[in-house]
Each structure stands twice: as structure tokens, then as C-alpha cells.
Image: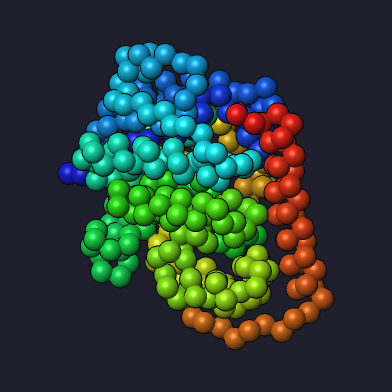
Amino acid sequence: MIKSKYKLGLIIQGAVVTYGQGPNNCKRGFNAIDSIMANIIDYRSMVDCIVLSTWKNQHFNVDDFKSVGLDECITSIYPPEIDHDNRLKQFISTMAGVQALKKSGSDFIIKIRTDQVVPAAPLIEWILSSLHLFNSSQTNTLETVGRICLSEYRSDTPFYAGDFIFAGWTLDIERFCRSILDMRNTHLHPCIGVDYILKYYSRIDDSFNQYLMNLWLPIIYVSDKQNSTAQWYWELFRSRHLLVIPKVIFTSITWRGRLMTDILSPNVLKGFSFHEDLILLKEPVRLNHQAWSINRLRSLFKTIYYEFTRYFRAIIKHYIYLRP
């Protein structure tokens, strides 16, 4: 095991009973107590502080978690806003965990979910061997905006990065969460994994913020894979501010009792990009605009239709059986 001079903090974030809205839904609810316990036990010897950040009125005995190594349990109040797809709740509870780890003196933060078991050794070893990649690409210091690590990219969805895992220097993870919470009443995109990236990007880059705010409907531009300006901004952002985990770590995750490779087919996984696919992106060259065509319009319409369909299905599910 690689040793670190930095203090590592772990946030286990989410509800104790989860339902979901993706490929591994659980209509009756998944009790995450065993997953939480497994993660605490697995990470206890590898991090300096472990925080469970969940919600009030959850049914569990915190002493059971503390008996195997939990340092602190934080229970937040559900936000008053309608949050059918958890784009707000996730960041409220993650930020609560960040604040607790800041008080404990953690230099580096990792966030995982309550309903997923993420093997500790490969994740921690990869992070510690890659710490230099988390530093700012501009000045290589911890005082500026460094890179944060998320779980995966989707090749067919520009500006998308998965939220199964967050990792980064404490200041950067705090900045990431705060950028979403400061725009809590604004939806820039129907896909959560795009929405929070757009919010974070616009907060840390004035040029992109100006570009985004001048767009009539951002989804049209950021969803168009042939829009050279939007794609240039996306590649620039990934090269400067993002990382994703290796595929071997992603596929080793157990999600609501099922291994990730049993949930996602090989064909679906082919559409994802991981650390070894990209290593470290080089800053892109700005290209000329591509001419509009029938195929380009068809592709754009298909993407927008898909995203809004998923968005409204999530709303319907929320009102049927996912309300807290």
C-alpha cells in the first residue's frame, strides 16, 4: 500500500434506503445498511476519517456503524424544493460531509454512495499513485483550481461525467459542490450528469460562462457533437479540470447488490470512457464550424428527445413512488 503524507477523508453519501432512476432501479427500495458497513470496514485502514452523510428520519442504528470504524454521521433535512432526480439532494449531503471532513483536517476527499460497495484497495492505490494529476494543470499548486475525478464519461454525450464517485483536493470538491448549490434553482440541462458539469464549468471559467449565458437554449448547443465551439470548450475543460477512474475500478463496483458488469452490458460499457482511454487529454485546437445537414439535425433531435424523455419519466416516477 502506497503511503501518503496527506490526510484522506471518505464520505459515504446518500439515503439508507435508495430507489434509483437508472438501469438498476429498485421500486421497493434497497436497504443500504450492509453496503455502508462493508465500505466502512474496507476503508477504515486506508483513510484517516470516514463520514456518513445521510438524511433525517432514516431507520438505522449509528452505533452499529461506529462499532466498525465510522467517525461521524451527519443527517441533513430534505430540501423544500421538488427534487425528483436528486440533482440537489446529492450535493447538499455531499457538502455536509465536506464540511465535516474540513474540520477533521482532511486534505483530500473521496465520495462514494451508500448503495454501492466500492473496493477500497484499487481505488485508494490508484488515487495515491495519481495525486500529481489532481493538481492544477496551469500552475501545479493546490491554491488554484485542480482536477476533480468523477466515475466515467459517455462517448455519445458531451459535457457528461458520472457521479458514482467524486475525488479531489478538499478545496476543489468544496468548490464543485458549492457551484451546484449556488445555482440550485437553475436547470441548464435535463441530464443530471451534464447539468452539474455545466454549472461547475461556468463557475470556474469566465469565458465559458459568458458563452453559455449568451445561448438561447444551452441544450441545443452542448448536445450537438458537431458544434465546434461547444466541443472545443468540452475538450478544454476535460483536459484542465477533470479525471475519471480506470475501468477496472468502475466494473468492480457492486450497486444495490449487483456487480456493475451484471447491470451494464458489454455494449453499454463500450459507450463509456475511462482513465486509460484518455490518460490525460491534451488541450484541443479550435476547429471551424461544421455545416448543418439532415443527419446532423436528426442526431441532435434524437439526443434532445432522449434526454427530455428520461427527464419527464423521472418526474412521473417521483410522484408515483419515489417521494421521500
Q: Which residue lies furthest to the front in this view?
A: 80
The quarter of the displayed image where residue 7 is located = top left
**Side (left or right) of 254 relative to 93:** right
Q: Quick check: 152 above or below 53?
A: below
| Residue nearer the viewer, 252 or 82 | 82
Across and down, in percent, residue 317 comes to: 72, 36
| Residue nearer the viewer, 232 or 273 | 232
Q: Which residue lies furthest to the left in this view?
A: 5
| Residue nearer the viewer, 230 or 178 | 178
The quarter of the displayed image where residue 83 is located = top right
Q: Quick check: 121 above or below 245?
A: above
| Residue nearer the viewer, 100 or 3 | 100
Q: Residue at x 52, y 38 (%)?
A: 79
The answer to whether residue 82 shows anywhere in this view is yes
**Side (left or right) of 267 relative to 115:** right
Across and down, in percent, residue 261 comes to: 60, 36
Across and down, in percent, residue 119 comes to: 42, 32
Q: Quick check: 59 above or below 306?
A: above
Colour scheme shown: rainbow
Across and down, in percent, residue 208 comes to: 48, 72
Q: Which residue is drawn at 73% across and 54% down?
A: 308
Q: Which residue is drawn at 55% across and 39% down?
A: 80
**Side (left or right) of 213 relative to 249:** right
Quadrant into which the N terminus falls: top left
Q: Quick check: 136 above or below 206?
A: above
Q: Which residue is drawn at 65% across and 60% down?
A: 156
Quadrant into which the C terminus falls: top right
